[in-house]
Each structure stands twice: as C-alpha cells, then as structure tokens.
Image: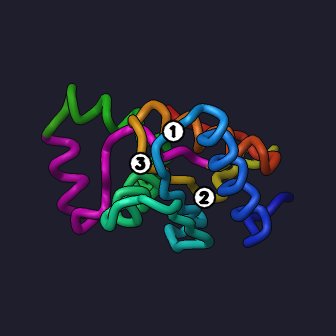
Amino acid sequence: MSKLTLAKANQMINGALERAKEAGMQPLSVVVLDAGGYVTAFQRQDGSSNLRFAIASGKAYGALAVGKGSRWLNDQAKDRPHFLEGLSNVSGGKIVAVPGGVLIKNAENEILGAVGITGDTSDNDELAAIAGIEAAGFTAVAN
C-alpha cells in the first residue's frame, strides 16, 4: 500500500512546477493535503500573491470533502448552487469550488489526499496538479 509521505508530496509539487515551467504558466502556489485535510507540503513561487495558500488549500479541501475533483464542485455550483451554499456553510467557508483541486489515489483506488493549485487559469492549475500527482506515481482524479 502506498502512502502519502513528505517526499512524495514534494515530488508532486516539483512535478507540478516543472509542468508549469514547460507551459509558461503564471507563478503558482501548490499545496498537498493528506486524506484528513492536513497540510503535508506547500510551496509558493516567487511573484505569487498573498491569498494563494488559502485558495489552493480550498480547492484541495473541497475535493477531499466530496471525494471528487474540484472541477466537479465547479459544475455543481452552476447546476446546484444551494448544494454549494450548504457545503460552504458546513465547511466553515473552507471550500473553493473551481478547477485546480485534484484527488490523489493509489493503486488500490484509495484516496491519499489532494493537490490544490492556484495562480494561472483554473484549467492550467488543474493540468499542473495532474502532472504533479502522476510524477509521484499516483493516480489523479480531477472530476
């Protein structure tokens, strides 16, 4: 059974930042949360603005809260705003329902945590998160 270690979390961050560099993305902030929603690792690139930790964490936390990527939450916000309002209330406002929060699963299909990224477009944030998770040898679930 694979685990989410600090070394693996840092590997995910490095993989995400490498993808961002290749694609010429804006400065990113990347957080890795464990399955309980606790921070395992975080990095913020030079030039990243001051609320980026909270935004990245909110994307990852939202994915963990519902067991789906934050793109799914974004779709729910459009189709079922009352659901998102209730979810926001019960989470104490911790959830950011836009793409960029991606679940981390192991080979046994267990959720090990989530990566949240912010700084570029939400689609690019999500692509970088997927690349980081895959670079560490895990499966990414964005939707």
The kind of residue on which mark 2 rests is Gly
The mark nearer the N terminus, 1 or 2, is 1
Quadrant of image for the N terminus: bottom right
Q: Pointers 1 and 3 in contact (CB under 8 A)?
A: yes
Which residue is denoted by mark 1 in the rendering? 25
Q: Which residue is mark 3?
A: 119
Towards the viewer: 48 or 98: 48
Report how far apart the C-alphas of labels 1 and 3 lie in the structure.
Answer: 8 Å
Crowd around label 3: few <14 · some 14–19 · many ≥20 (10 Å)? many
Residue that appears at 63% across and 49% down: 17
Q: What residue span does the magenta drawing correspond to?
A: 82-103
Mark 3: which amino acid? Answer: Gly
**Kind of residue at disc 1:** Met
**Quick one: label 1, few (<14), some, or many (20+) residues within 10 Å?**
some
Residue indicated by mark 2: 113
Relative side of 12 to 119, left or right? right
